[in-house]
Image: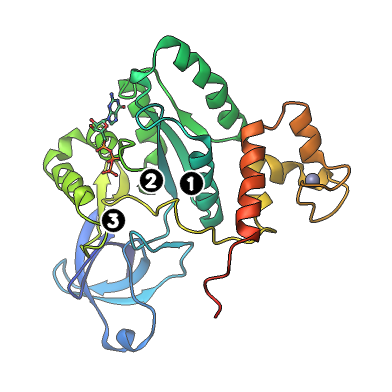
Amino acid sequence: MKTGIIQQSLSGFYDIFSSGKIYRTRARGNFRQRKIKPVVGDHVEFSAENQREGYLLKILPRRNQLVRPPVANVDMAVVVTSAKEPAFSANLLDRQLIALEAQKITPVIYFSKTDLLDEDAYQQLLPIIEGYQRIGYRVFANRNPFDPQQLLSLTADLKGKVVTMMGQTGAGKSTLLNHLAPQLELATGEISQALQRGRHTTRKVSLLEVNGALIADTPGFSSYETFNMTVNDLPFLFPEMARLAPNCKFRGCLHLKEPQCAVKEALNNGIIMRSRYDDYVQFHELIANQKPNYKK
Ligand SMILES: Nc1nc2c(ncn2[C@@H]2O[C@H](COP(=O)(O)OP(=O)(O)OP(=O)(O)O)[C@@H](O)[C@H]2O)c(=O)[nH]1
Ligand SMILES: [Zn+2]
C-alpha cells in the first residue's frame, strides 16, 4: 500500500503523485458505492504494481475543500491584488482574506501592477502594506512586481504546498504564474487559455508542479460569493481582532457596541487599521441581513 496526492482526475482515472512519481489508478469497485468522490488534492491510499494500473483504495480526511476549482487540502492561496488597473480595493482584499481564513487556507498577498504607480501613489500604498504585514500576512509588494528576488522568495513560500491563485479578473494571476514558471511555457500557455474560457465550461483540473509547489491550474474561488460564515464566526476571521478578543469585557464580544471592547480600543489607538474595522462592520451587516440560502 502506498500513499500520495491526486494530481489529476480524468474520465475515471486518478493520477497520483507519490514519492516523485505519477501513478495512474482507478477507484476500486466498492469505492464507487460510497458517496464520497475523489478530487484533486485528496490524500489517498492506493495499491500499484506499476505506474500504469493501480487502485485507489481510500481517501484520507480532508482539511478543506474548494468547489471552484474542485481541489481538496489547499494549503495556500496567492491573493493577486492589483495596485492599479483595476484600482486597489481594501474591501475586496479583506473579502478574499476572510474567505481563506474561513477555509483555513493561508493567504499570501501579492500586489501586482505596482510598476504602474507613480512615486506618490506607491508611497501611499506603503502604510497599507505594512498594516497587513503587522496582522501577520506575508505581503509581496516590490516596486517591480517581477523582481527576481521577490519571485524567488514567493517560490520559497509556496514550496511543498498545494496552492491556488485568487484575485479579480485582470489582476494578473496568469501573468504571475507565467513569471513563476517560465520553464513551463507550454503548460502555462494552456493555463492562460483555460482562464480565458468561460466559468461554465467543465474541464479537467490538475495540480501543476511548479518549483516544488503543486499549483491548481485554474484560479480559486470567487470572493463575490455570498458570505458563508455566521456573524459569530466573523470576528475570528480577522486575526488581529481574534488576538484581542480575550481582552474584551464580554465573552463573544462582536466589537460593535459593547463596552470595554479591546478591539475598539485598539482601533482608537491606531493599532487596528480603520479600513479593516470598517470592512468588518460592513461584512457583519451583510451577513446579518443575508437570507440563508441553504434552508428552505
Ligand atoms: N504593468 C503590469 N501589467 C500587468 C501586471 N500583471 C498583469 N498585467 C497585465 O494585466 C492584464 C491582465 O493580466 P492577467 O494575468 O491576464 O490577469 P488574470 O488575473 O489572469 O485575469 P483573468 O484571466 O481575467 O482572471 C494583462 O494585460 C497583463 O499583461 C503587472 O504586474 N504589471
Ligand atoms: Zn470586543
Q: Which residue is mark 3?
A: 19
Query: CA separation, marks 2 and 3?
Result: 28 Å
Q: Nearer the viewer, residue 170 or 186?
A: 170
Q: Tell me the residue at 43%/24% (across/down).
A: 141
Query: CA separation, marks 2 and 1?
Result: 8 Å
Q: Is mark 3 within 8 Å of ligand 1?
A: no
Nearer-N-terminus badge (2/3): 3
Nearer-N-terminus badge (2/1): 1
Query: CA separation, marks 3 and 1?
Result: 33 Å
Q: Which mark is residue 166?
A: 2
Instruction: Please count the marks in the image.
Output: 3
Q: Which mark is residue 62?
A: none
**Vertical comparison of 273 with 163: above or below:** above
Q: Tell me the residue at 40%/52% (across/down).
A: 222
* Picture quadrant where residue 268 is located: top right
Q: Which residue type carries mark 1?
A: Gln
Label 2 close to label 3 by CB (< 8 Å) = no
Label 3 element class: loop
* Picture quadrant where residue 118 is located: top left
Q: Which residue type carries mark 2?
A: Met
Q: Which residue type carries mark 3?
A: Ser
Nearer-N-terminus badge (3/1): 3
Label 3 close to label 1 by CB (< 8 Å) = no
Q: Which residue is mark 1?
A: 96
Near mark 2 (Cα within 10 A), the count class, few <14, some 14-19 or many ≥20, is: many
